Amino acid sequence: EQYKRSMANTDITLQATQNLVDIIWKDQPSAPTKKSFPYETEFAGATQSSKRKTLAKELKINGNSAAVITLPEGIAWLLNIRGGDVEHLPIVQAFSILHSNNEVDIFVDKRKVENLKEHFGNGINLYNENDFLSQLTRLTGSICIDKSSLPFAAYESLLASKATLDPRGDITALPKACKNETELSRARDAHLIDAIAMCKFLCWLNSQSAGILTEIDIVIELESCRSANPELHDISFETICASGPNAALPHYRVNNDSNRTIKNGEVILIDSGGQYKSGTTDITRTTALGQVSSEIKQAFTLVLKGMISISKLRFPKGMAGCDLDAFARVFLWSEGLDFAHGTGHGVGQFLSVHEGPQRLSRTSNVPFEAGMIISNEPGFYKEGHFGIRIENLLTVTKAPKLEHSVVAEMFIFETLNFVPIDKSLIEKDLMSTDEIVWLNEYHSQCREKIRAHLDENERIWLDHATNKL
């Protein structure tokens, strides 16, 4: 529709065709057929039948006869299933229709879900993938759709039906984003497991000498530390390890051509995460081998101040990412600096490490709600020289009521990651007393939560890393 509007006064017309890539890609690999598996209620916190009933009730209230769900993350959440169709993302590729009578039609390669008959029970109807478009043409009444994710072919099929379209968005997006108490408890477990692996890794890294290790060496060691725990299902995305000028590229991925040896005094930016059945993790730490320049220390400290500012916020209900994003940037702005990406993204529960609808960004108008998980990752990147990013995941939680507050309801953030921040990169004179108190308390929590899970050498490292600034 946007393309059509932009071409309204031109001689250009849009014409649907067969996928041109499919025509010329003769050696395409076969579609994935890995078996899906149930995501048990002890992790999900609600049964798939109760989720269906809740959303079906919402459909009835809004006068919808059905909702078309085309994002696999939403289907995975709704039906409490996970799969292996996409690397690092435990989803099942499928389409679905949720009806207002609680029933779900799922369109999927049946080989992937034949083991889920007992899990599905009554009310879930299996169809072949190729039946999706024809079933859409049979729908009647008001159909809830999400225009941003609905394939054009599905849109055309709905237009050919006797249904009317209600484009109010993905009906699963908000309830999926607002984790329940079971999901949050499990997420804390996942982040504890992940923090232990990260601390073991950082102990190893901080004991290394410059001029020997490469970026790929570091990635291999970190992934080895994570995979040592059998609860790891997969990493949550390709690990970012960027040193020196490579760190100035916010989403750099090392390969054999770009791989470089870590030099003395260079920053090392490491952004990584894990997929555990109890949750999805994402964390960034910036460190160095050897002494860094005063310019790097200043930039690191300004980034840290922004990260602490977000972590400490108390804000009224109804605020969105666009209302809070500046708190992460104000210290950089004061020095004429900034970063060219959002401050944070939503995170799924044993699903996508990048999940909407919430974001911590100048462009996000979605209000924060209790239970949402968001990343807090300000940075600074000097092209051709160095890059800095510090990231923790936060969950939105209701703030305790203040005695004289005139605001009806307020939120605060709970930090989920507990991995030390490199104090050797901090310019203490730039830190306020409150910021130092926050950092010391955070490091005290890191020590309390992690120390018992480390060996003697790692405990020595942790004690030093979490000493008061």
Image (cartoon, rainbow, N blue to C red):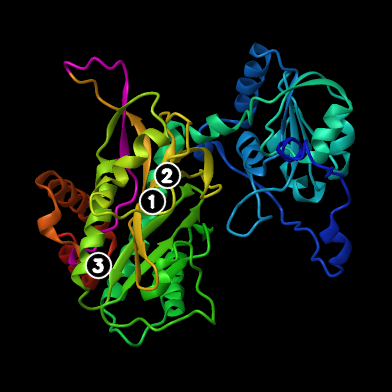
Q: Nearer the N terminus, badge 1 or badge 3?
A: 1
Q: Residues within 10 Å of mark 1 (few under 14, many from 20)?
A: many
Q: Tell me how far mark 2 sits from mark 1, CA to CA.
A: 6 Å
In the rendered structure, find residue 93 and report the number of the disc placed on it: none
Q: Which residues are magenta?
A: 403-424
Considering the image in quadrants, where does the N terminus appear?
top right
- Compared with residue 45, is residue 204 higher up or lower down, i.e. above or below? below
Q: Amino acid at mark 2?
A: Ala
Secondary structure predominantly adopted by residues drawn in magenta: loop
On the rendered structure, is 453 left or right of 26?
left
Residue under pointer 3: 296
**Residue sitting nearer the eye, 340 or 46:** 340
Residue under pointer 1: 191
Q: Amino acid at mark 3?
A: Ile
Query: Given this view, does label 2 or label 3 mark the residue nearer the observer?
Result: 3
**Residue sitting nearer the eye, 84 or 2:** 2
Taking the spot 13% from the left edge, 47% from the top edge, the residue there is 437
Where does residue 90 sit, x and y in percent of width and height? 61, 51
Taking the spot 47% from the left edge, 47% from the top edge, the residue there is 279
Where does residue 260 sit, x and y in percent of width and height? 43, 82
Residue under pointer 2: 187
